Structures are given as structure tokens and as C-alpha cells.
Image (cartoon, coloured by chain):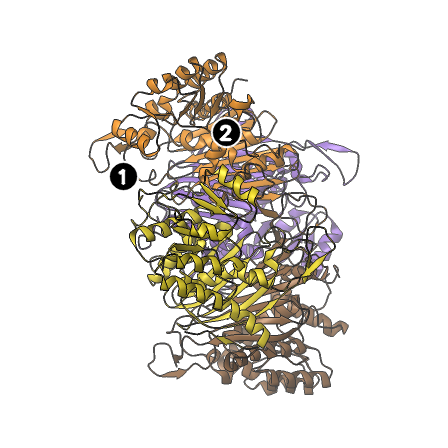
Chain colours: A yellow, B brown, C purple, D orange
């Protein structure tokens, strides 16, 4: 496994782009020398040169393109959250499985070396039995905390499915499952502090925001661990605070995306019983997978864009070698389970009940 | 208010001690030159020289001594959590109010200068409208995470009321109310990872642990904010991790007892728009209340023991000047509301429902 | 050694105070119930009830009282730096040794548990051979960085000997010797950014500042290690930044007084070769000496005032048990070697040469 | 200036590679589709298709290729330190200037957004008058601290000029000049803890190490500020610790490459006089130059490789637009002044004197 990312000499080509606005998509295609560009995603999906569809559109444009692509036998990477709700996600999963295409939900943070290393530490049992997980993603997205920020697709259920919960919380919920395991039950609360927004910046005309801008939840994992989730756009002061803490019977680990190359690790160290404490580990060296394709042991040797390089490299390799996308990457199954958690937070908030997830 | 703690020349004398074991309590009284010592707390409460009772016993010994003291017109400080459950706490509150004695629940962290300063920042509106509070208290108490740690009064409902939730979570719940306001509803989960413990260290004979060693909860505040609480004994690696984060529409604040003299503050700073970020503020100077009686502007100029000095000084002053214990300190009212939250976490965990608190 | 601080049942009484101003010293004596108070330190030294003299005056009042006390056979604790220059310090040392009194230079930071623990780690060889030491003490002393801060005894050679170098740098220089060993040679630079100050706050009349407000030096240790020292009053932004880093062939340690209970430790850990990194160790537990007399394993369980309690307890114990003040504490020998370093920084700055210290 | 990096549509092509080993250089050329590859750098320099030479060889291969390139009218980027000593560097500078070619010393850290921002803060006067600079670069380079690490070109004067001082200290010395200004005088000490190394890993045959593996220095800046420099390979525990602190009369700034996207800033903030403290600023947003070509406001949106992209983009742009390489980038003049500092540290160490630099 440590050799997983040794250079494999193959390359992927972007052969077509689709976008709503003719000028923009043409200009982009020209700049990056992409052969075809379409205003209708259906044409892209149908283009015989396209073997893999990468759906980076908002959630309301996840289901139909994915289903169409699967039916044509094309592999699909789809942005997170996988869909506006679990029902849509389940339909996408079923179609992809029926047509035996490779499918991946683009949870890119699984491909941060420090997070992959945290998973390894947990799987190796070095933290003992896992007792508690806390996952947070608080990010004002450069202005979502301000009431003057205008309405975009993020703020309505029709286009986004969920608000901060979908945009941010879905990442934390994926890491919960990635690191600790399946979630069985959820209670939570969602709220909306900024209830309406201008249609355009500065305009008087406003429309209703009908998704959360702050959500919090308690989790029960199948293995007995407890957990919590937090997602918020209206938490001023944060930068890009995707953080988790995992506590076990023997040790624990903390991560914060704001310091992406670091892991805080408390491990049993019986040789230094007088010197226990969280150690700051830079997960960067040649020995950590995911780093091999990049510059090596420099403190700043990994950044956000590389999560995508790793992610797409993984998917390309899975297609080429016919390997499993998971557990390294998230499949549509993971995307569906993820949607179940998001939906349950809202349902618990509305019904005042703990929500059990289907097994 | 900034002059609140200017030296007031009065002193309090410890005139009596009570403890179960004759030798220990006598020895302690001798060492500290305390006039009287008793094996029966009733005698201490009845001692005419005693004007104020400070109840440092476990929760099962809170209700009766407090009620007895109040009925004799004596002022009472009682350790936290105020009682094993909200019903006991309510009885203590009612008796104290009926007899017009001063009453304080010993939530000593209200008297940390950094926390008092956080409260001031929030009350002054410098964080804007408060949206979110997270409060954690994770502490292995030097061994509670290990199954080999023997049974003490902490581990059974009869003596403790709650487990980690009462011992640790009560502090986080008090800070929630202190900093953000009244809590209206709670959902949560409690669990017990170490289900039985030896009666003595190393012995084979074991008894059941019937309180939580890990709890998590979601909160709805009356003012619309959301929150979460975490309390755990079985979270290996932590030292004394009583931490909170409070997010508002304009700024936010973070605190961790492990760095007791620091506050992380994000404040609007329109003069340095290119340099926003959490600032590490050492809350130590002469200008911060609570520090006046102590050594001044040295980085390490405040420590744990001083929280108690501040707390008891405050109570003594309230008695002498006939001032209100709250909002600076916590009363039995706060102790009762606190118990309502703790009880609700367990009830939510058992019933699978959000629990509304009485108003 | 781990039992060193187990309670020893003895107490010290303050029997006399001396100060320039009659009213102030009388008031202080009254408040703390001290029997005698004098305006002339000679009377205090001669008072037959005085067995130990604690000289907390500025450097120009160190030599004569210490010599007088030693000649009367009284033990002496003297504030740091021991004197205005090495010649004065040598005279104090010689007199104290001639009269066989116990003598201590009040380098209180030797009594911080985290620093004592760093010393132990180094002495145990856990960092390997020591290669490098950096010691800094940057502190604006609540206003020394501002040109409007008026002249006090700190700012002239006649009264202080050195400026930031003596007030702050002496601590860093003592830690260099305490942790790494004897210093053989020094080069450095001293400067004065604020060259004159008002005689009183706001007054027009000014006088010259003839000591440094910023100094930096390179050190050669006898054991081959290199080092650096920094001391500054004119370094805006710092709080109480007494920090050191010690690097060895196997590991390293970092300390900052602003986080007084923490040590950053990098130790060889061959069981976790993939998880090396600085660990944050809270030096607080029952197992760490110096903590035994205080509250136990709470994160904030040690503060600045406790350094003095430890220091004076140590000196009292050395007198009572006739034990050596060093290496735990600093003697007048250490105070003299310390002055040699300070003097050498200034001499190097003036002469443009590396200065060798006498052996 | 904020528009400096708006996309300029031009691209640079790598047209030739040179390397000692035929197979390696051919393979590399094939992988990256480079037209020509040579074993002799002279051929590369003479290749008429080559307009710009990028010299990434060790210091002993800096002078001759640079001089040859300049004489052929080709622009040159040369790795740091610019040469083995100031005399070589001066010759390179003179030749480049004589032939009017663009020349850059590859001090890539000038192109870290956080460092560029620190420079801006200083130039804008927001820290007041600069008093003190400390620059450190401690990095074990994945094993240089271990005596078993074999001899490479880094360890001998003939090939490297200097040891840790050249490899690491040159960066810190460049930042001193970049951020604070010209250096006038230097004192320092250099040492070598590992005095000989195996010719190959594990072999018995050894050769002498005749460069430093640890150096420390004091600096006098022309503007009156003082400074210090540290460079070390034998400081176990560090990761990639290129750190600086700059203190002024009004504020200060701290940086550590291990947290490359962060700046610690203390700025005067008269609106929050009770909340002063170092703020952690993520220098990442769209408003910070150097970030425009990259992914935007994500915490991890900049890494080590991007310093080179910025650096080479800058040089390409200076050539195309005929603009000045400095002050944004370092020229050969800067490379020469840098070598003067490095040489002075060694000379001071050998002669026991402060060394004045030529003006």
C-alpha cells in the first residue's frame, strides 16, 4: 500500500466541457485547449469521446446527469453532497450499480495526507477503541455570514437541498464515517439566521432562504461511539475550519484544515511516561502515501489543490486497474449514507426526535 | 465595576471542619489551626460560630446539609453539580430563598479572568448577535479512562447523580448559560464504556457503573442560538480540556482551560481589513477585574487556585455588602437550571426525544 | 529527589522590613503584621532577630547590604542581576564564602516545574549531546517601549548596571548556564532606541538613558555548544516572552513563559517512527517536583507567584538542612558568572571583539 | 500593484536540460518532452534556443555557467547561495551587469504571500521603526543531523562554500535584508559537530567535513536595528523551521515556514485597547498578491511549489516587460550582499572580531 501512488504513466484528457453560458464555456475550452464545449450537459454526456463524467454542478444538477451517464456506461465523479436528499442519491447509486460503472462522490478531504494518516492510525488500533468523534466545518465562504450577501443557489432547497449542512456539514459527516464507521442514529437542530437575501448584490428585491445556515447534531455510531457534527456559515471569524477530534481508549487525534499538513496525536508512549502530550506531526514525508507525486519533506509541501489531484488520480487508477474506489475514496454508497445523515439532522430538528437511519 | 475588587479589608475565618474520618479531619484541623472539627456535618451546621457553610462533599451530600443550613439562616456555598437531579436542586433553592440566605453554586470557572472578559465582550455586543456555542469538558481525571481505575462515588447514580456529565459537563453547561443565556431544549446521548469497576484497586470484586462516562448534547437557547455540549472521562490524551467557542454575527471567542490566561478573539477591525484573524489576548493586566488582588501583568499570573480565592471573596463580599451573587457568581437558581440540562441529556438519550426545559 | 518537596513542617517569619519611605514601609509592616520596619537597611541587617536577608532592591543596593549581612553571618537572597557589574558581584561572592553564609541569587524561573523538567530531560541525556541554545527575554514591562515612559532606576547605569540586558537578559543567561553549562565566550551588540526620558511622567525635564534597551549576543559554551541571547524592552507586541529552545543530537525542547505550564518536547520515539513531532507536555502532575505543595493535575495549577514560593522554600530548606543551594537554585557564584556574561555583551558591542570569560 | 499578477497570457518553454548523467537527463527530458538534453552545461548555455538559464546546480557550479550565459547575453536565474563566496558572487554580478542581462538569485521565500505581506506591513510603517529582527533556519534535511548520513556536496567547502550557513542561513539572511534593510556588520560563530562522513552510506571510508553544521550570528543593520541569524542541520526535532520575528516600536510580526500560510501580527488597535495580542492572519485571500493565479480563500491554498511558480513567473515577466527584478525578487546584487554576510559569520568565528561589510 505504501507504493500505491508510485508514478503510473498514464494521463487523462479533458475532452469536453459543459456550462450554461456559451461565451464562458467557450472561452474556458479555448484557454485549456479542450476540444468540445456544450451548453447542454446532455450533449457532453452523450459525446462518444467522453468516458468519465465529472459533475461539478450544484446539487440540483447531480441526479439527472449522473443517471444519464451511468445509463450510457460512463464512469462518474460527482461533487458533494451527492444529491439534494437521500432519495435522489439512492436513485443515483442504484443506477450506477446496475450499469456497473465506477462512481465516486468527490469528498476530496479523504485525500489529505494528514487525514489519510489519521485513518491509518485508527485502523491500526493505535488509539484503542474509538469512543468519540467531533466533526466541525465552519466557514463563512467569504461573506455568507453577512445579510448583504446576495442569494445564490446555495440558499434554497430547490437548488441546494441543504444549506451549510450540505455545503460544509457533508464533509464532516463523511469524515465521521470514513474515520469511525457507520452512523445509526442522529439528533440535531438546524436554524436560519439570515432568512432572506437580495436577488442581486445591493438590490431591494429579496427572496426567502429556506435552508439552514447553522446546524448541529449528535451521532450514535454502530460501534457504540458517540459523535457530534457542526456546520455553519454564520460563525464569524473562522477561516476554513474543517476540524475533527477522535478520542479512543488509548489515544486521540485532532485535525484542523486551517493547518492542513499537521496532525495532533496523543499516543501511548510507555518509554516516556513523564512526557505524554499531543505531538504535532507534519504529515508530509516520503513515507506518507499521497505525497509521493509531490514535492517532498517541506513543511508547506501540500495544499488544497493537491486534494483534487489525488482524488482524480485515484479515480482514474480505479477505472484503469478495475479496483475499488472505496475505502480510499467515497462511492455513491457513501454519498447516499451521507445524505441520510444530513436529512436526519433536519428531520430531528423538525420533529423533535432522534432519527434512526436505515441499515 | 472595574473597581469591584479593590481590596476590602476583611477576612474570613474557618471555624469548623466536618469529615467522615475522625483522624483525618482532626489532623487537618490541627494543621490549619481550625477550632472545631466534627464527624457529623449536622454538628458543623449547628455550630453557632458558623455563619457560612461551604459544602465540598459529593452530590449525595448536598441537599440535606444545604437545607439544614438554610433553615438555620446560614449562607451556603455548595459544590457543583448542585444536586443529583433537578428535583433535589429545586428543593435546595426553595429552602434557601424561603430563609433569605445567600446561596452560591461553586462554578469557579466564572471567576477565571479570561472567561469573565469573554462575558464582557459578549455583553458589550462586540461579537454581534450570538449564533453558536460549543462547550466541552473532557478530562480523564488522572485515570478514569482506564478500566482498572476502581469504583469511587463518582461512578454511581446514588452518590453522584451523573457521571462525566455531572462532574465535567456541569461546568460547560454553566458557561453556556453564563455566556449565551437560558437554554430551552436539549437533545443528547449518554453512554458508559467502562460498565463495571473493582471495589478497590486490583480487587476482583466489582460493582456496576450506572452513570455515563461520555455524553454529548445539542442545545437550543432561548435567544435563538444553537449549541453543543460534550463531557467525557474516556477521551484519552486530554489534560484539562474545558473549552468553549462562541460565534456571533460579527466576531467570535475561543477559550481552553489548558491555556487559562489566554482568550482567542476575532473582532471586527475595520482599520486593518487585510489583517483579520484570531488574536491571542492574555487576560492578565491590572485593567481586568479579578486580577487586582494578584500579581500583575506576568504571563503566568493566574492559576487554578485563584479561581477559588475569587469565588469565595465574591461570596464573602456579597454577604457583607448584601449584594447579589449573580450574575457574577452562580446561585442555587443557576444550579437548578444546570441540573435541568444534565437531566435532559440523559432523558433524551433514553427516550429518543428532544426535551423541553420548564421556563 | 522526587520526594524533595514533601511537606516539611517549618515556617519562616518576616520579622522586619526596610524601605526608603517611612509611611509606605510602616503601612506595609502593619498590613502584614511585621514586627519591625526601618528606613535604613543597615538597621534591618543589624536586627538580631533577622537571620536571613532578602534583598529586593535595585542593583545599586545589592552589594553593600549583601556584604554587610554576610559579615554579620546572615544568609542572603539577592535579586537578579546580582550586581551592577561582575566586580561587585565577585566581591559579594567572596564575602559570602568567607563568612560561610548561604547565598542565593533570585533566579526564580529555575523553579518553574516545566523548566526544572527540561533540565532533568537534558541531564538524563534524552536530547543527546546539546548543540544549540537560544534564550530570549522580550518584555515591554507595561510601557518601557514607549518614549513617554518616564525615567526610573532601570534606565541608568549608576542605579541599574545594565538595561534590558540586566533586567531581562540576566534570566535568559542564567537559563543558558542552568540548562547547558558554563559559557566561555561572548560576542554581542547593545543599543538604546530611547535615549532620554522625562524625569516624571509628562514633565519637560529629561535625563539621559545610558543603558541598553535592546541587546543580542552569541555564546560559546565550554562543552562546544553554541547559543544566542536576546533581551529587549523595545520589542512591541510581546507579553512576557521569556523563551528558550535547546537542540541536541537526539531531540529538543522549547519553552515560553507565556505558556508557563507547557513544554514542547521532541524525543526519539522508535515505536512511532511515522509520528515524530513536538509534543506539548503539561508539566503539572504529582510526579513533577515543585508541584507537590500545590494543587495537582489541573492545567492551570501553577503560576508566577509559585516560583517565589518554591524559591524561598528551597533556600529556607537549604539553611535548615545545611544543603547546597545549587544546582537547583543559583548561588552568588552563578550570579557572578551571570554578570560576566552581561558585561561581556556590552564590552563586545563597544570593542568589536569576541570576549573570553575568565574560567 | 494589487493587479501585478493578473493573468498575463504568455508561456515559457523548457527547451533544454543539462545534467551529469546521460541516462538520467535523457529520461527526464523524455518524460517532460524537452527537446534537447546535454551532459555538458556549456552546450546548454550555447544552445541558440535557450534565452534564459536556470542554474539549479550546487554552488561550485554557479559562477562559470552564469558568467558564460551572461557573456552570451542570456538571462540567468541562479540558485542560492549565489556562490561559494562573495568574490565569486561579485564576479557574477559584474558580468551580468556588464552584459545587461536580467539576473535573479532564487530566494524563493520572498514569493510566499505571507512574507510578501509582512514586507508590505513593514514598508507601510504599521510596525513603526524597526528595532529587531531574528531569522532562523533549522532543518535536518531528512538526516543531516545523523553522523551516519553520508558525504554529499553539501559537506565540503570546495563544492558548497558554506554548510548549514549557505544552505539554510542564506535564506534567513536574505529575509533580513528583504524585510529590514542593509546589514553593516556581523559577528558570529560557526561549528561542525559531525566532523567526518562516510563516502557512501554504510561505507568505512570517510572524508572530512570542512563546513559548518551550525552557525549563529549577530547583525547590525544600517538603519540602527539589531538582528540575529541561526542556521543548523544538527538541531534535531525541527521540521522546516525557517522563522523570523520582526519587532518595531509599534508592533511586530512572526512567521514560521512550518505554518506557511499564517502570519502572527501585533498591530496597534486603539479601538480594542483591552484586547491587544498577536493575531493569526491567514494570508490567502484574493486581495493578497501572489495568490491571484492560485485557488482562492482556502486555508491550504498555497504550498511550497507555488513559491517557484511565483518566482519564475516574476522573472519571466521582468524579462518580457523589461522591469526590475528587485525589490520583489533578489538580484545578483542581493546574492552578493548575502554572500558577504555568510563569509563574515565564518570570518568572525575564526578571528574573534566583529566584521564590517563593505558599503
Residue neighbourhood size for the residue with mark 1, other residues' Cα within 10 Å, grouped as few (<14), some (14–19), many (≥20):
some
Q: Establish whether labels 2 and 1 are both on one chain.
A: yes
Find residue B259 and name its label: none
Position of residue C255 measured from the top left corner of the image (x, y, whole percent):
49, 48
Q: Residue at x 63, y 83 (%)?
A: B66
Viewed as shown, does residue B114 lie left or right of A166?
right
Q: Residue at x 72, y 50 (%)?
A: A202
Establish if B168 lies above or below D17: below
Viewed as shown, does residue D125 lie left or right of D172?
right
Position of residue A209 measured from the top left corner of the image (x, y, whole percent):
65, 62
Establish if A220 lies above or below A291: below
Residue position for label 1: D148
Q: Mark 2 lies on which chain?
A: D
Q: Mark 1 lies on which chain?
A: D
Query: Does dot 1 land on a helix, a strand or a loop?
Result: loop
Quadrant position of the C terminus of chain B in the picture: bottom right
Establish if C250 lies above or below C225: below
Residue A339 vs residue D348, the one in the foreground: A339
Answer with mark 2 or mark 1, whichever residue precedes in sequence: 2
Residue D116 vs residue B118, the one in the foreground: D116
Whole-number angstrom distance, CA of label 2 to CA of label 1? 47 Å
Viewed as shown, does residue C287 lie left or right of D209?
right
Residue position for label 2: D10
Q: Which residue is drawn at 57% across and 32% down?
A: D179
Position of residue D15 measured from the top left corner of the image (x, y, whole percent):
38, 25
Query: Would residue C224 be visible to someone looking at this image?
Result: yes
Q: In which quadrant of the rendered view does residue C234 lie?
A: top right
Residue D78 vs residue C331, the one in the foreground: D78
Q: Which of marks 2 and 1 is in front?
A: 2
Query: Does dot 2 land on a helix, a strand or a loop?
Result: loop
Query: Would residue C286 be visible to someone looking at this image?
Result: no
Amino acid at each position: 500500500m505504501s507504493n500505491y501512488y508510485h508514478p503510473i504513466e498514464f494521463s487523462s484528457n479533458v475532452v469536453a466541457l459543459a456550462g450554461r453560458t456559451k461565451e464562458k464555456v467557450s472561452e474556458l475550452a479555448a484557454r485549456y485547449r479542450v476540444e468540445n464545449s456544450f451548453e447542454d450537459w446532455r450533449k457532453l454526456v452523450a459525446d462518444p469521446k467522453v468516458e468519465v463524467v465529472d459533475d461539478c454542478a450544484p446539487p440540483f444538477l447531480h441526479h439527472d446527469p449522473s443517471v444519464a451517464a451511468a445509463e450510457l456506461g460512463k464512469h462518474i465523479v460527482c461533487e458533494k453532497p451527492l444529491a439534494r436528499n437521500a432519495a435522489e442519491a439512492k436513485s443515483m447509486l442504484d443506477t450506477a450499480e446496475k450499469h456497473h460503472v465506477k462512481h465516486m462522490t468527490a469528498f476530496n478531504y479523504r485525500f489529505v495526507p494528514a487525514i489519510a494518516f489519521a485513518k491509518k492510525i485508527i485502523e491500526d488500533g493505535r488509539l484503542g477503541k474509538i469512543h468519540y468523534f467531533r466533526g466541525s466545518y465552519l466557514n463563512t465562504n467569504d461573506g455568507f455570514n453577512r445579510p448583504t450577501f446576495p442569494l445564490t443557489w446555495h440558499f434554497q432547497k430547490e437548488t441546494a437541498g441543504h444549506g451549510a449542512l450540505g455545503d460544509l456539514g457533508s464533509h464532516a459527516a463523511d469524515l465521521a464515517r470514513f474515520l469511525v464507521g457507520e452512523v445509526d442514529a442522529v439528533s440535531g437542530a438546524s436554524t436560519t439566521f439570515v432568512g432572506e437575501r437580495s436577488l442581486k448584490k445591493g438590490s431591494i428585491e429579496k427572496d426567502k432562504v429556506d435552508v439552514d445556515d447553522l446546524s448541529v447534531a449528535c451521532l450514535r455510531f454502530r460501534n457504540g461511539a458517540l459523535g457530534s457534527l457542526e456546520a455553519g456559515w454564520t460563525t464569524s471569524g473562522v477561516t476554513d475550519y474543517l476540524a475533527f477530534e477522535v478520542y479512543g481508549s488509548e489515544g486521540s487525534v485532532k485535525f484542523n484544515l486551517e493547518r492542513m499538513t499537521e496532525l495532533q496525536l496523543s499516543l501511548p508512549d510507555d518509554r516516556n511516561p513523564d512526557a505524554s502530550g499531543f505531538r504535532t506531526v507534519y504529515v508530509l514525508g516520503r513515507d506518507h502515501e499521497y505525497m509521493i507525486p509531490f514535492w517532498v519533506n517541506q513543511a508547506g509541501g501540500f495544499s488544497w489543490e493537491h486534494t483534487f489531484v489525488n482524488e482524480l488520480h485515484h479515480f482514474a487508477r480505479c477505472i484503469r486497474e478495475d479496483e475499488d474506489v472505496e475505502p480510499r475514496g467515497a462511492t455513491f454508497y457513501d454519498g447516499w449514507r451521507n445524505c441520510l445523515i444530513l436529512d436526519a439532522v433536519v428531520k430531528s430538528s423538525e420533529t423533535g426526535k432522534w432519527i434512526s437511519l436505515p441499515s
